[in-house]
Image (spheres, coloured by chain):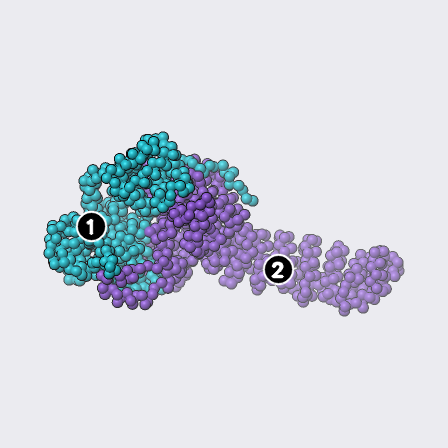
Chain colours: A purple, B cyan
């Protein structure tokens, strides 16, 4: 499905919600089925194609809605649609983020309806101001940009488009083309329908000065030469031709200002205020209790707002600041309850999910990596589990890597995790070359869960246990796990760490009561590791007879000789040749084995 | 798995009327579109079919509102009424309203009437007759009725613009009332601010004017009235200036915010921030416009805390208080305790307004600037202000704001009558001539447009030499108050 079709589907659901809210008087329970439906659709049309970090922008025109320059929605009776109402009230565009839910949309639509209804009737004295409500209202996954004086290319007015065209039969096509050109010119930073100027990846960044200035494109606008000229020319501001030049604008500066005015940047306000308040608390030597209390109360209000919308960048900034105060007991004491609230915010399921998903997001991961360290370790399992559910191997690896690099005692932590988490962690920790991986592996080999043991067997090359310990663990395993162990052991290219295990196993005859296939594995492994010494041991089982003609250990003999026949070990070929040469003549042996022996040489 | 959203089974077309204003707006959009197209396209162009379809649909929707079975559109002054209800245009509709008003005014038409049962062909015919009406006819009604009769169209009607002139005095009186109302509100705000500044926590025991209501009311006033009040307070000597500084900047903030197309609620918040900016002077005990120090900030917090019951500030307002004293620097970045912040645009706007007001504030023992001098100073100061906002401010206010007394190079003494208005464009003002080039007082002021050019020489006919104080101008009060003769 094309991106335009996805966008169309998303927008139609938005309009339908607007209609539904009117039908059911704003009671979400009544339309729960529809909300579930829309959540499903959002998953299909928004999350799956674009991911949770995406931001889709819809541009509102008078009677239609555009996405990526293509018409996404048009109604025959536009004056009844939400898009028209929003257009009329001065909304230029709406951005939806990947985390959007039907419930959030419904709440938003209800707010719009309420604001519109407050201006009931045509009497303008009771007029509502939806634009202001939208400007101020922050929604985690919905952002609105408003028209202001600088929105020169107000493509919302379709008459502009029509005026500029030679009207032909296919006027729709011309109109669409015109609209597309203007939209591209105006919003050149949008590609594939994804708004890069305000995307989810950027919304955790600390709204510090450089970032904002860069986003607004204001950096580099200041022209030193122009300022110097200005100073001279302004000696006579009455000369209006010169004044005209002085007061002339360049498009970029208007664009930057327009973007600032389009919406209320709660993050900027909160960040700037936090910086001021925290600075006063840190730097001012003599603060009365009342002053300190007042500042603290202000800080708390901001922090609560930040927690509510979970802006990780701001939370991290605050945590780091608090960390600096550890050495100042007075300051530390002041902020203890705020710090408590901050930490609590990192324990809710909803926030942990957002934090977890950030590990899978290339732009948000850096902040997530720092912030997660302020979480209580008991929530690490839950966080990791979210990444497993999302199927993000990259995210899982980043998460574990963060914990390792920051000295979190995973060795103690991991055993308490569930089977699912340990299974996922095993693969990732192996890739990360975690120094304590062998210890963890040893724990996994002794786990209660057969699946964990089985998975651990796949990493035997990293096991660093003494032979007797390995043998003890092995002996306690179920047959299928023993087989798995041996299969994986057989695949190893370096057996140095396993020599003792194998030798001890043969010493105690661990192979004796095994099924044939397992026995074969023992012999293969044993011959690789012990070589000629094992041949000596096994020779007994090959040569032993009862009543001169019958093999005393037929099962063992057959397995040993089958292994010998298949072996390509050059060092042992002469030994094998000797066996085969002498044993192929034996009458009382299986025809299958005899023919194998004869065929070999 | 993809799910077809049509299964939601909700019809998007039609539906309830959430807001009659929006329905009415769509009617005006359609009417504007049609009439606008008549100026550029021939009537055979197929665009008119589409426009007519939209208009008919809008009319149909409008008829669902009780009392709108028939429709009458009236154009009075700068206002448009639909069945006697005034339509207040949103920012996006401004230019469409202005077009409709101008269109009707040119044809001297003051009202259009649409019957209850109108048909497509008759509507089309009526609109084309209106569009084809010649400009500035003596009897536009007669002309239109004749044309309609020729076409056999009945039920439609027009009124002449004379209808407006009959109400001229009433409307003029209304307009004058609005100016007075603005002044009254301004005075109440000033009083509110002054009581709070003087009494802080004890202010709650006073019968304070309702600040929020006052600001909301002010935000509805016309820009010209707001500017008139602002201008009238410049360069005046006040024994107790702080309240005036607060209220003046508040008024200017509303007007400027309106010119920038900010939504109503945002303008109100900006106005609140503008009003509260003078709290910094209270903390400083001085109308100093420098950077805020830590101690001053703490005093400010104490004051804000003391006033929180009668004058609670939002987070943005508090931020503006802390920031507006910061110079803009190279790109709006300032350092706060080692962390770089970017000043909010509210703070940057308030800085410009507050400084302009301080520069033009008459205070004993200090210099003050005439408005144009203040602007020149502000434009020349490197790194003090957001240059974009400053240019917008100057263009909007005019280098010589309305009311400024000026001398032309040719010797006339004038008062600026219309200045600026468009923040994006520098415009030469229209002045009211009070003394001729020989210095003789005029019997009655005469308007002169300084944008007029000498076509032969390609230069402006008249240019301002400099601004004058009231004393320098030496013009009697009666002449200043006398309405000028139009261009």
Q: Residue at x 35, y 36 (%)?
A: B125
Relative side of B340 to B403, left or right: right
Label 1: chain?
B
Indicate the position of residue A286 as horizontal and vertical percent values: 29, 62
Q: Kindly identify which numbered label has been placed on residue B487.
A: 1
Q: Kindly identify which numbered label has been placed on residue B153.
A: none
Q: Quadrant of the C terminus of chain A?
A: bottom right
Tag 2 residue: A442
Rate crowding at label 2 as few (under 14), some (14 to 19) or many (20 or more) other CA atoms within 10 Å: many
CB of mark 1 within 8 Å of CB of mark 2? no
| Front residue (pair A463, B41) | B41
Rate crowding at label 1 as few (under 14), some (14 to 19) or many (20 or more) other CA atoms within 10 Å: few
Q: Is mark 2 on a helix, strand or loop?
A: helix
Q: Which residue is drawn at 25% across and 60% down?
A: B458
- Quarter of the image for residue A240 reads bottom left
Q: Residue at x 29, y 61 (%)?
A: A245
Disc 1 or disc 2, which is closer to the eye?
Answer: 1
Q: Are the residues flagged by discs 1 and 2 from a single subunit?
A: no
Indicate the position of residue B127 as horizontal and vertical percent values: 34, 38
Q: Is mark 1 on a helix, strand or loop?
A: loop
Q: Residue at x 24, y 59 (%)?
A: B456
Indicate the position of residue A579 as horizontal and vertical percent values: 83, 64
| Front residue (pair A15, B292) | A15
How much space separates mark 1 and mark 2, taking CA atoms? Answer: 98 Å
Indicate the position of residue B335 as horizontal and vertical percent values: 34, 63
| Front residue (pair A238, A142) | A238
């Amino acid at each position: 499905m094309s991106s335009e079709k996805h966008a169309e589907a998303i927008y139609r659901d938005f309009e339908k919600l607007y209609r539904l809210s009117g039908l059911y008087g704003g009671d979400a329970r009544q339309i729960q089925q529809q909300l579930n439906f829309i959540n499903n659709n959002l998953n299909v049309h928004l999350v799956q194609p674009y991911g949770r970090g995406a931001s889709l922008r819809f541009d509102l025109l008078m009677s239609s809605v555009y996405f990526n320059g293509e018409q996404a929605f048009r109604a025959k009776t536009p004056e009844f649609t939400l898009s028209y109402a929003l257009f009329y009230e001065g909304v230029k565009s709406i951005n939806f983020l990947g985390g959007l839910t039907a419930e959030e949309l419904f709440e938003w639509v209800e707010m719009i309806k309420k604001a519109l209804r407050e201006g009931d009737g045509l009497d303008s004295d009771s007029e509502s101001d939806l634009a202001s409500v939208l400007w101020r209202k922050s929604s985690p996954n919905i952002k609105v940009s408003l028209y202001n004086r600088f929105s020169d290319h107000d493509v919302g007015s379709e008459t502009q488009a029509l005026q500029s065209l030679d009207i032909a039969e296919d006027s729709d096509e011309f109109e669409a083309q015109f609209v597309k050109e203007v939209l591209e010119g105006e919003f050149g930073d949008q590609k594939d329908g994804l708004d890069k100027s305000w995307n989810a990846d950027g919304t955790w960044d600390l709204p510090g000065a450089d970032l904002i200035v860069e986003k607004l494109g204001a950096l580099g606008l200041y022209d030193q030469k122009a300022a110097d000229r200005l100073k001279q020319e302004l000696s006579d501001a009455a000369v209006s031709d010169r004044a005209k030049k002085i007061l002339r604008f360049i498009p970029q500066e208007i664009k930057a200002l327009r973007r600032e005015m389009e919406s209320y940047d709660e993050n900027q306000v909160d960040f700037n205020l936090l910086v001021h308040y925290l600075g006063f608390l840190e730097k001012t030597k003599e603060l009365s209790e009342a002053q300190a209390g007042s500042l603290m109360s202000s800080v708390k209000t901001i922090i609560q707002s930040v927690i509510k919308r979970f802006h990780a960048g701001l939370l991290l900034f605050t945590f780091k600041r608090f960390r600096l105060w550890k050495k100042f007991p007075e300051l530390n004491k002041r902020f203890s309850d705020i710090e408590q609230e901050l930490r609590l915010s990192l324990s809710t399921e909803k926030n942990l999910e957002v934090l977890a998903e950030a590990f899978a997001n290339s732009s948000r991961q850096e902040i997530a990596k720092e912030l997660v360290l302020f979480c209580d370790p008991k929530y690490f399992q839950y966080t990791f589990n979210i990444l497993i559910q999302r199927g993000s191997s990259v995210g899982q690896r980043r998460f574990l890597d963060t914990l390792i690099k920051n000295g979190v005692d995973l060795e103690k932590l991991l055993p308490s995790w569930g089977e699912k988490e340990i299974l996922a962690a095993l693969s990732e920790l192996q890739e990360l070359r975690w120094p304590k991986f062998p210890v963890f592996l040893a724990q996994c080999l002794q786990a209660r869960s057969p699946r964990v043991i089985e998975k651990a067997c796949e990493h035997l090359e990293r096991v660093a246990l003494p032979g007797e310990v390995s043998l003890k663990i092995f002996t306690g395993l179920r047959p299928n796990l023993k087989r798995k162990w041996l299969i994986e052991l057989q695949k190893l290219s370096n057996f140095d760490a396993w020599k003792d295990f194998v030798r001890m196993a043969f010493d105690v005859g661990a192979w004796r009561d095994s099924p044939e296939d397992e026995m074969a594995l023992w012999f293969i492994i044993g011959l690789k590791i012990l070589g000629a010494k094992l041949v000596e041991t096994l020779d007994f089982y090959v040569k032993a007879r009862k009543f001169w003609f019958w093999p005393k250990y037929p099962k063992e003999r057959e397995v040993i000789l089958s292994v010998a026949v298949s072996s390509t070990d050059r060092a042992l070929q002469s030994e094998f040749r000797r066996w085969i040469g002498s044993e192929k003549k034996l009458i009382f042996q299986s025809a299958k084995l005899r023919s194998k022996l004869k065929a070999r040489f | 798995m993809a799910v077809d959203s049509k299964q939601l089974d909700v019809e998007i077309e039609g539906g309830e009327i959430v807001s009659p204003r929006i329905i009415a707006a769509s009617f005006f959009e359609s009417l504007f579109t049609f009439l606008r197209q008549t100026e550029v396209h021939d009537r055979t162009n197929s665009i008119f079919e589409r426009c007519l379809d939209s208009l008919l649909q809008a009319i149909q929707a409008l008829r669902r509102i009780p009392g709108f079975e028939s429709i009458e559109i009236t154009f009075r002054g700068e206002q448009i009424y639909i069945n006697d209800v005034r339509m207040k245009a949103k920012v996006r509709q401004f230019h469409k309203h202005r077009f409709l008003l101008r269109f009707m005014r040119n044809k001297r038409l003051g009202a259009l009437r649409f019957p209850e049962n109108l048909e497509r062909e008759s509507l089309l015919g009526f609109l084309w007759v209106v569009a084809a009406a010649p400009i500035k006819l003596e009897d536009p009604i007669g002309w239109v009725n004749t044309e309609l009769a020729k076409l056999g169209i009945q039920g439609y009607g027009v009124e002449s613009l004379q209808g407006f002139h009959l109400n001229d005095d009433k409307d003029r009186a209304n307009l004058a009332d609005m100016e007075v109302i603005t002044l009254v509100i301004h005075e109440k705000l000033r009083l509110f601010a002054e009581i709070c500044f003087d009494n802080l926590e004890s202010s709650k025991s006073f019968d304070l004017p309702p600040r929020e209501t006052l600001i909301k009311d002010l935000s509805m006033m016309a820009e010209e009235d707001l500017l008139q009040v602002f201008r009238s307070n410049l360069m005046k000597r006040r024994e107790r200036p702080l309240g005036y500084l607060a209220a003046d900047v508040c008024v200017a903030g509303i007007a400027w915010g309106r010119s920038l197309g900010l939504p109503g609620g945002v303008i109100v918040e900006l106005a609140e921030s503008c009003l509260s900016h003078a709290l910094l002077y209270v903390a400083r005990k001085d109308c100093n416009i420098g950077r805020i120090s830590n101690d001053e900030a703490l005093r400010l917090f104490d004051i804000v805390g003391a006033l929180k019951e009668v004058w609670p500030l939002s987070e943005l307002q508090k931020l503006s208080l802390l920031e507006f004293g910061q110079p803009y620097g190279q790109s709006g970045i300032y350092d706060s305790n080692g962390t770089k912040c970017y000043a909010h645009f509210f703070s940057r706007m308030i800085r410009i307004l507050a400084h302009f007001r301080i520069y033009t504030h008459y205070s004993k023992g200090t210099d003050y600037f005439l408005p144009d001098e203040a602007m020149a100073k502000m434009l020349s100061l490197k790194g003090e202000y957001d240059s974009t906002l400053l240019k917008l401010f100057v263009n909007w206010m005019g280098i010589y704001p309305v009311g400024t007394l000026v001398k032309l190079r040719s010797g006339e003494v004038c008062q600026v009558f219309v200045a600026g208005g468009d923040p994006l464009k520098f415009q030469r003002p229209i002045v009211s001539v009070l003394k001729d080039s020989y210095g003789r007082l005029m019997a009655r002021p005469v308007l002169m447009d300084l944008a007029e050019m000498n076509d032969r020489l390609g230069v402006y006919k008249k240019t301002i030499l400099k601004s004058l104080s009231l004393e320098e101008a030496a013009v009697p009060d009666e002449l200043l108050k006398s309405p000028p003769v139009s261009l």
